[in-house]
Image: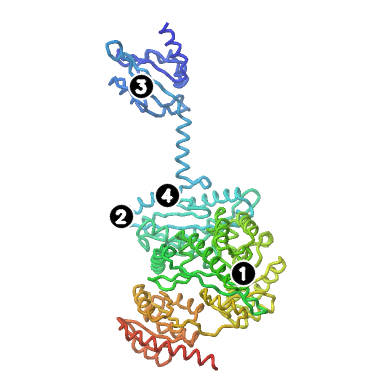
């Protein structure tokens, strides 16, 4: 009875079972059930009585089972491929159990097998998905990093070059928005195929994110021209792409970095190529190439150094808010202000937002900073209301990263509740680029913000990619004309035409208009004449601290400000390419109550001079981008009331003497300096600067 029951169980078991005789040489198959016949694709008649080695191959998993039979030991689990038919291969999972008699002698073995092909294929698919992008089919970034790391070790040993290209497809967000995400995915696949066609056998490629790709060219002969390589990629993408009935030509911004040209590690290669691509897009708008240079490496090192200090700026209380009034043009009355963040670093001095906001975005800190600005600006606005100030509009900038999900809505609600600021007094500013990144999502968030009661503005209008169709749908209250257009009016015909068009378009849609960057009376007159309701800029007031802003709010009629600033201690601009020198000078001079700006290039120095009143400029003579005497000669022409000094350990005395005699340089001081002498000289220079400003005002 028991034997018959066993036979029925053995025969009907869904697992593929084989009973193997261990007492006979060769370990013949004694019996097998129907499931085993199906699994192995062979009948009982073909296998029963056949030795194991004759029945199956000596490869895995059958080799492991044979070892178990020979040693009379169980095999817990083994997985391998089995050719069931010439055109069909399956994956088997097999177990072996030993059967003993009453005396404990091994007499038989039971081999259990199952078809795990689907599971294995699923695992392989999961592994593929983990290493490859599903849209383009290209490897993911971490795969490229691992392979590039191994390749870099070989390049160091055998002395050959590696070039990394960072490819950023231009205006892909607009394509996605216009034709849909499915179309965008198919386009990304086409781009990937084009780029793969440009690669060599040993080259590496991946899709990094969105519309960005990375190509690593293994240049074993070290003869590849970087510009020609990048141009070949652009040429490939410029060929028409056909999807359904549409045909379009693509452009891209390509950045190139090389080992050992400027990079010595995988991270440096990727980072430098990314920086070069971003500069290509920023400078030309797209369809361009930038090769990372040694000079850019110095700038990148500086960005990394500033970024390291920036990480702790919020926690250490180093951020502060300044406020620039927004003026109703016709009445010359303050109707609001824009909150602008500044960073007062103990190591770097006063750092302007143009030097650290892009860093905050790159290093993932912009959301934290944006939240800090929103909270502190709302608290300050509430304080002004409690001090009896009439209604006004407080404008706060919003970055693209703050727009992810519903976080911005939560942050605004929290800031308003905590400060008890009426929502109608808060205005949030979005740039065109932020809006166009994901129009549908941003529009949805904007509508929710309008339900809360806050106002909305589109900032930097005129330089982005928004279309009239999108503009009509956006729930904004006003547009802000970008300062680049305002700076050029009325002399530049094109800028004047664009400014008039923006004002007219805004009024057509029911928006009011704010013009940023108003610096001159002729600009104000042009804007008023063309119907611009509100203006903002240094012509009326530079950004000021909360106390000064309160004083202005209490006398809302605002006349244009004087040429020189109202900093009690005076403002000094220090220009030197050595950061340790800048830090030492800032520490020394700050004790005298001066406001300190620092710049490591002449370009940065002119940006500061163009946006802030400076009394004294102290510059090194030998700089990477020129000579101090030439720089100060230009400062004399553009900012004649600024006192100019050279502080340098190297100089052509003849050139410096000529500059002093010509009036470009007030004084030449040598490095290393004497602290007391330097402070005394700067005190005298500051006195001269203030006298010059007073004389100009009186005249």
Compute the Cα span from label 3 to label 4. 40 Å
Q: Position of residue 98 (x, y in %)?
A: 33, 18
Quadrant of the snapshot with the N terminus: top left
Q: Secondary structure at mark 1?
A: strand
Q: Residues within 10 Å of mark 1 (few under 14, many from 20)?
A: many
- For the point 40% across and 8% down, which residue is it? 3
The answer to whether mark 3 and mark 4 are in CB contact below 8 A is no
Mark seen at residue 96: 3
Nearer the viewer's eye, disc 1 or disc 3? 1
Give the mark nearer the N terminus: 3 vs 2: 3
What label does residue 142 carry, if any? 4
Horizontal and vertical percent position of residue 493: 64, 77
Please give the name of the residue rendered at 58% of the width and 68% of the height, measured from the top-left corner: 395
- Residue underneath mark 1: 393
- Spatial CA distance of label 1 from label 3 is 80 Å
| 689 vs 26, nearest the viewer | 689
What's the residue at 55%, 75% (across, down)?
549
Mark 2 surroundings within 10 Å by alpha-carbon count, few (fewer than 14), some (14 through 19), many (20 or more): few
Mark 3 or mark 4, earlier in chain: 3
Sequence-first tag of 1 and 2: 2
The alpha-carbon separation of the residues under discs 4 and 1 comes to: 47 Å
The residue pinned by badge 2 equals 158
- Is the residue under label 2 in contact with that under label 4 (CB below 8 Å)? no
Asked whether residue 647 appears in the rendered view, the answer is yes
Residue 382 appears left or right of 25: right
């Amino acid at each position: 009875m028991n034997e018959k029951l066993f036979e029925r169980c053995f025969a009907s078991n869904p697992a593929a079972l084989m009973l193997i005789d261990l007492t006979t040489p060769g370990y013949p198959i004694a019996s097998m059930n129907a499931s085993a016949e199906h699994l192995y694709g062979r009948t009982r008649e073909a296998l029963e009585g056949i030795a194991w080695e004759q029945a199956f191959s000596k490869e895995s998993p059958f080799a492991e089972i044979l070892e178990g039979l020979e040693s009379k030991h169980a095999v817990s689990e083994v997985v391998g491929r089995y050719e069931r038919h010439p055109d069909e291969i399956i994956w088997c999972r097999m177990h072996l159990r030993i059967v003993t008699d009453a005396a404990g002698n091994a007499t038989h073995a039971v081999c259990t097998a199952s078809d795990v092909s689907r599971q294995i294929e699923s695992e392989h698919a999961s592994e593929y998905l983990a290493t490859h992008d599903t849209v383009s089919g290209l490897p993911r970034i971490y795969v490229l990093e691992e392979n590039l790391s191994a390749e870099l070790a070989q390049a160091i040993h055998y002395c050959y070059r590696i070039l990394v290209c960072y490819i950023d497809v231009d205006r892909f967000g607009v394509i996605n928005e216009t034709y849909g995400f499915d179309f965008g995915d198919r386009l990304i696949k086409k781009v990937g195929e084009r780029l793969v066609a440009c690669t060599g056998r040993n080259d590496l490629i991946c899709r990094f994110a969105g519309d960005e790709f990375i190509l690593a060219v293994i240049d074993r002969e070290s003869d590849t021209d970087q510009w020609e390589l990048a141009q070949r990629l652009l040429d490939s993408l410029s060929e028409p792409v056909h999807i359904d009935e549409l045909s379009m030509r693509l452009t891209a911004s390509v950045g190139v970095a090389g080992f050992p040209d400027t990079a010595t590690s995988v991270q440096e290669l990727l980072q430098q190529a990314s920086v070069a691509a971003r500069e290509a897009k920023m400078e030309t708008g797209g369809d361009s190439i930038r090769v990372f240079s040694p000079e850019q490496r110095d700038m990148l090192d500086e960005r990394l150094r500033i970024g390291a200090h920036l990480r702790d700026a919020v926690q250490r209380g180093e951020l502060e808010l300044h406020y620039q009034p927004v003026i109703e043009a016709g009445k010359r009355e303050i109707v609001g202000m824009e909150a602008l963040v500044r960073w007062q670093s103990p190591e770097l001095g006063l750092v302007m937002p143009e030097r650290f906001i892009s860093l905050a975005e790159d290093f993932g800190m912009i959301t934290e900073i944006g939240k800090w600005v929103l909270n502190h600006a709302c608290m300050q606005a509430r304080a002004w209301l409690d001090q009896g100030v009439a209604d006004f509009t407080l404008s706060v900038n919003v970055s693209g990263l703050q727009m992810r999900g519903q976080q911005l809505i939560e942050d605004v609600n929290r800031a308003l509740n905590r400060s008890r600021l009426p929502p109608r007094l808060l205005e949030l500013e979005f740039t065109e680029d932020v809006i166009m990144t994901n129009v549908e999502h941003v529009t949805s968030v904007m509508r929710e913000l309008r339900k809360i009661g806050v106002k909305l503005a589109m900032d930097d209008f005129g330089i982005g990619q928004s279309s009239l169709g999108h503009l009509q749908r956006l729930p904004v209250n006003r547009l802000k004309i970008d300062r680049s257009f305002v700076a050029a009016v009325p002399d530049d015909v094109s800028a004047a035409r664009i400014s008039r068009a923006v004002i007219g378009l805004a009024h057509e849609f029911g928006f009011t208009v704010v013009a940023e960057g108003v610096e001159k009376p002729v600009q104000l007159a042009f804007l008023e004449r063309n119907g611009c309701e509100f203006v903002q800029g240094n012509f009326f007031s530079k950004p000021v601290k909360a106390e000064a802003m309160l004083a202005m709010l209490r006398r809302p009629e605002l006349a244009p400000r004087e040429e020189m600033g109202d900093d009690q201690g005076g403002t000094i601009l220090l220009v030197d390419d050595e950061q340790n020198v800048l830090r030492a000078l800032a520490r020394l001079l700050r004790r005298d109550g001066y406001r300190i700006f620092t710049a490591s290039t002449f370009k940065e120095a002119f940006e500061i001079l163009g946006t802030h009143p400076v009394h004294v400029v102290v510059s090194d003579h030998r700089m990477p981008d020129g000579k101090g005497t030439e720089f100060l000669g230009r400062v004399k022409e553009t900012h004649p009331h600024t006192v100019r000094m050279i502080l340098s350990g190297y100089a052509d005395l003849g050139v410096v003497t000529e500059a002093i005699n010509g009036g470009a340089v007030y004084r030449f001081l040598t490095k290393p300096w004497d602290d007391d002498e330097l402070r005394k000289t700067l005190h005298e220079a500051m006195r001269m600067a203030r006298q010059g400003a007073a004389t100009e005002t009186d005249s």
